[in-house]
Image: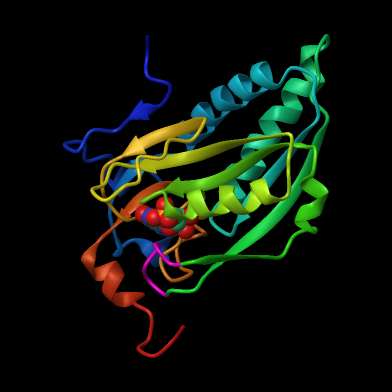
């Protein structure tokens, strides 16, 4: 059986940024383009179809994990609503909600998380919830978020993550829907950030050392 995600091997070096369009202000800061925007769209279209077929015509609450998940969320929802319009015999009533996760530790994703923003999580009781996330790295954030969500007794919870990172120290968590499995690299673009920079880049790119240095958080900042 085919893998249900696209595996990007460690030896793959993506595309030179000269082959695509990148904002001038990031030209010096990127190693390569790992996943061009067009490929993200095509993969997301298929994920939307898989989700649509699994859900049948039960209502679905799509829960966007901000800020990194917002572009994947809007594109996935666009594709789901297109299926809703065009399919004819089946449609999925969609609700949307947004949460932001605040980590208690600055640069260590193993820290405790707190949910901020969005409607009261009590509104998820009895609902089929689809969590839409940008990337699973160690998997700790998702494990904690799922534990919090379950306290609010949804009918079901599934997770769609555009990316899963292959990295040592991972909890081994796999989302129900995954776009791409990527090497252990820090990626930016398509709403994924490095200290709030690069969200305004369309492609998913590997940041270079110069970029990390240029956009490093000022010492003492939160
Ligand atoms: P985890 O708890 O280690 O799985 O971390 C998940 C969170 O870390 C994601 O939701 C992102 O906000 C952030 N993150 C992890 N890796 C990257 C990356 O390569 N680029 C941007 N953000 C990342």
| x 59%, y 20%: residue | 50
- Position of 31 relative to 81 (above/below): below
| Residue 34 location, quadrant | top left
Image coords of residue 187 (percent x, y): 35, 53
Which residue occupies the extreme bottom position in the image?
220
| x 52%, y 59%: residue | 200
| Pick the front one: 104 or 117 | 104
Q: Main secondary structure of the magenta part?
A: loop
Left or right placement of residue 183 versus residue 49 in this view? left
Residue 107: within the magenta?
yes
Left or right placement of residue 120 versus residue 135 in this view? right
Image coords of residue 206 (percent x, y): 30, 53
| x 71%, y 65%: residue | 117
- Position of 139 relative to 40 (above/below): below
| Pick the front one: 142 or 197 | 142
* Quarter of the rendered image showing ligand 1: bottom left
Magenta segment:
106-111
Image coords of residue 139 (percent x, y): 41, 49
Which residue occupies the extreme left position in the image?
11
- Position of 101 relative to 157 (above/below): below
Colour scheme of the rendered structure: rainbow
- The mark tally for this picture is 0
> From where the camera sits, is residue 136 visible?
yes
Left or right placement of residue 144 versus residue 19 in this view? right
Residue 101: within the magenta?
no
- Position of 164 relative to 65 (above/below): above
Image quarter hosting the N terminus: top left
| x 70%, y 41%: residue | 62
Image coords of residue 172 (percent x, y): 35, 40
> From where the camera sits, is residue 192 visible?
no
């Amino acid at each position: 059986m085919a893998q249900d995600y696209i595996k990007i091997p460690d030896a793959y070096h993506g595309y030179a940024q000269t082959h695509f369009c990148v904002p001038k202000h990031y030209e010096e800061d990127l190693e390569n383009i790992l996943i061009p925007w067009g490929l993200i769209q095509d993969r997301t279209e298929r994920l939307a179809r898989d989700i649509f077929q699994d859900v049948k015509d039960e209502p679905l609450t799509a829960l966007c994990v901000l800020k990194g998940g917002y572009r994947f969320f809007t594109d996935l929802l666009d594709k789901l609503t297109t299926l809703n319009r065009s399919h004819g015999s089946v449609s999925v009533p969609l609700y949307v909600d947004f949460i932001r996760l605040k980590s208690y530790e600055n640069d260590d994703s193993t820290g405790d998380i707190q949910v901020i923003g969005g409607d009261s999580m009590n509104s998820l009781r009895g609902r089929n919830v689809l969590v839409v996330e940008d990337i699973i790295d160690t998997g700790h954030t998702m494990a904690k978020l799922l534990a919090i969500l379950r306290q609010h007794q949804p009918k079901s919870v599934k997770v769609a993550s555009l990316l899963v990172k292959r990295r040592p120290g991972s909890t081994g968590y796999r989302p129900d829907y995954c776009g791409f499995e990527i090497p252990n690299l820090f990626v930016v673009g398509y709403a994924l950030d490095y200290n709030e920079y690069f969200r305004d880049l369309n492609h998913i790119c590997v940041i270079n050392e110069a970029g990390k240095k240029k956009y490093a958080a000022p010492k003492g900042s939160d």
